[in-house]
Image: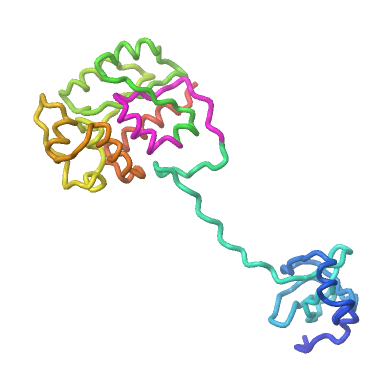
Amino acid sequence: MSSRWDRSDGILSGPVDGPARIEAAHPDVEARPGLKVEHRGSRYAGAVLRLERDGVVIRGRSGGERLFRLVPGAFQVEGRAVNLVRPTVQRAAAPPGRTASGSVAVTGGRARVARAGRILVEGIHDAELVEKVWGDDLRVEGVVVERLDGADHLADVVAAFRPGPGRRLGILLDHLVPGSKEARIAGQVRHPAVLVTGSPYVDVWAAIRPSVAGIPSWPEVPRGEEWKAGTIRRLGLRGEQWEVWRDLLGKVTSYADLEPPLVGAVEQLIDFVTEETT
């Protein structure tokens, strides 16, 4: 092909009542390879082959190639005069967002109608931590988290719930280790539609990584002493328990701020409650 301009561009290759007016009169169409066009001045028709610095190369029906300037209104597409323009640069799609639990965020979706199944946690701090990290996931799945306010009456709660097909119950307990009171309570509620998981920590506070809490480690509190009060005293913290917890919870941004045993226990419960049963 010739590297010179095609001299049969016709009158539309130059000003016709001003280029700005012509450009405004016709829609812009991106000159992407394969687009079928016709040069209005020369009636040369074909498909866009490529763009060069000086214009657009059109491959004709016979296989020949010609170079035309991108003059406003100089081409027509599907019988309509257009301004053939250079394609805009396509930006890579942003990676999908993530929830605090690490799941792919669902945007624009509504919360699912609540399932019959439930997840029970021991107290308000457990509930608030689960909500902060897994709240988005739970709403998408339609799972409600309820407080026990202590595990001592767990057997009665489970009996009243009447677990069964389509009514699964997940239970999260603190200090679920062999020989503990919590382990004995868990043994009283065995049922195919009930799953009890937990962490080895005496209190859910200790399931937050010490580095996130801004301390070297969680202190050892002797058995028989109230754990939260003993922890606050040994760490030299000021304020009521609810104030300390508010500050502590505010430092948690995702599952990565929690110890793996708690993360695994909660995710196991979510999987169990949302598993489809027949």
Colour setup of the view: rainbow
Whether residue 32 is in magenta: the answer is: no
- Residue lying farthest front? 239
Image coordinates for residue 178, horizontal then vertical, percent: 17, 26
Image coordinates for residue 18, horizontal then vertical, percent: 85, 77
Q: Does 224 appear above or below 130?
A: above
Whether residue 126 is in magenta: the answer is: yes
Q: Residue at x 34, y 14 (%)?
A: 158
- Residue lying farthest left? 222
Q: Residue at x 18, y 40 (%)?
A: 237
Which quadrant of the figure contains the N terminus? bottom right
> Residue 185 falls in which quadrant of the image?
top left
Q: Does 145 appear above or below 254?
A: above
> Residue 208 falls in which quadrant of the image?
top left
Residue sitting nearer the eye, 28 or 125: 125
Image coordinates for residue 161, horizontal then vertical, percent: 39, 13
- The residues colored magenta run 110-136
Q: Residue at x 30, y 17 (%)?
A: 190
Image coordinates for residue 247, horizontal then vertical, percent: 29, 40
